[in-house]
């Protein structure tokens, strides 16, 4: 079978699952590797291959990379994981007084370090020619220059750090293949578990379903070219300032 080979990390989440569905339905895609810690939550399909990846276990990432890499190069890798809150110990901080070291470390482990480790093991599997893409879901609140409200210290900082990692990846990746891209993406506010406690204040028309957000992100990825590598782009294709 010919066609693109794609990897979605975080395939059991709202946006990740939608990305898997949309990619698998495309005629130009041969295989979608759907990676999650709990593969039992991944919907099976003729093009979908479930892969176990635990962002807290680098060995699982290395094993998945070895298995996928043995089958050929990848055309697209999307890291669609994220942590904003988790009962009972993690919540967005409203003040510096709420900063907790353990909670902050866990947010960074998922939002920043996990994506960095995916890059460590999978960027080398990207096709060495053409226009392969490594993308990670970031968030507009990770923009330093766009921060007007403060708060959410751990989440904001972890996404800002992710954007820096992605910029680094873009520079290194460009030395290997000038047509390749590494980009950060803001999906908008999406009806998922991550955003559920905070979606009540979202203006009409600005709360997206996971499917709509995923399609927007794929459209953005397809609209970019090599000069955009290292950038940070919103769901509508507009650049987001770092």
Image (cartoon, rainbow, N blue to C red):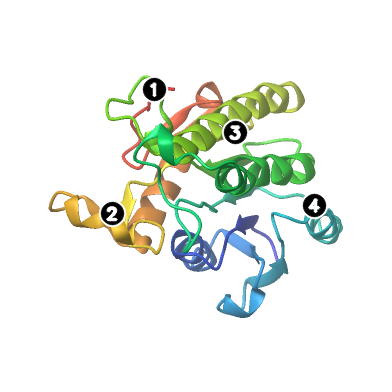
Nearer to us of marks 4 and 3 is 4
Labels 2 and 3: the sequence-earlier one: 3
Element under disc 3 = strand
**Cα separation between marks 4 and 3:** 21 Å
Residue at position x 59%, y 32% from top?
A: 181
Element under disc 2 = helix
Nearer to us of marks 2 and 3 is 2
Q: Note whether 138 is above or below 36 in the view shown.
A: above
Residue at position x 87%, y 58% from top?
A: 70
> Toward which corner of the image does residue 171 lie, by quadrant?
top right
Residue at position x 64%, y 64% from top?
A: 30
- Residue underneath mark 4: 58
Nearer to us of marks 4 and 1 is 4
Labels 2 and 1: the sequence-earlier one: 2
Depth order, front residue of 46/205: 205
- Residue underneath mark 3: 182
Q: Position of residue 194 (x, y in %)?
A: 41, 58
- Residue underneath mark 2: 198
- Residue underneath mark 1: 241
Q: Which mark is residue 12?
A: none
């Amino acid at each position: 079978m010919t066609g693109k080979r794609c990897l979605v990390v975080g395939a059991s989440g709202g946006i990740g699952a939608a990305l898997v569905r949309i990619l698998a339905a495309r005629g130009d895609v041969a295989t979608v590797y759907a990676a999650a810690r709990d593969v039992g939550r991944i919907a099976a399909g003729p093009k979908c291959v479930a892969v176990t990846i635990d962002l807290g276990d680098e060995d699982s990432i290395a094993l998945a990379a070895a298995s996928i890499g043995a089958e050929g190069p990848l055309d697209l890798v999307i890291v669609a994981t994220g942590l904003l809150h988790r009962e009972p110990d993690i919540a967005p901080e409203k003040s510096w007084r709420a900063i907790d070291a353990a909670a902050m470390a866990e947010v960074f482990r998922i939002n920043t370090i996990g994506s960095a480790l995916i890059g460590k093991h999978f960027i080398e599997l990207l096709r060495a020619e053409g226009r392969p893409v490594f993308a990670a879901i970031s968030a507009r609140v990770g923009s330093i220059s766009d921060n007007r409200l403060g708060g959410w210290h751990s989440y904001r900082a972890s996404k800002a750090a992710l954007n820096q990692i992605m910029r680094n990846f873009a520079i290194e990746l460009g030395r290997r293949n000038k047509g390749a891209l590494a980009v950060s993406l803001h999906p908008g506010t999406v009806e998922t578990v991550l955003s559920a406690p905070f979606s009540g204040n979202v203006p009409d028309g600005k709360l997206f379903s996971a499917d709509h957000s995923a399609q927007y992100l794929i459209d953005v990825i397809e609209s970019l070219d090599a000069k955009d590598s290292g950038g940070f782009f919103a769901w509508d294709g507009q650049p987001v300032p770092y």
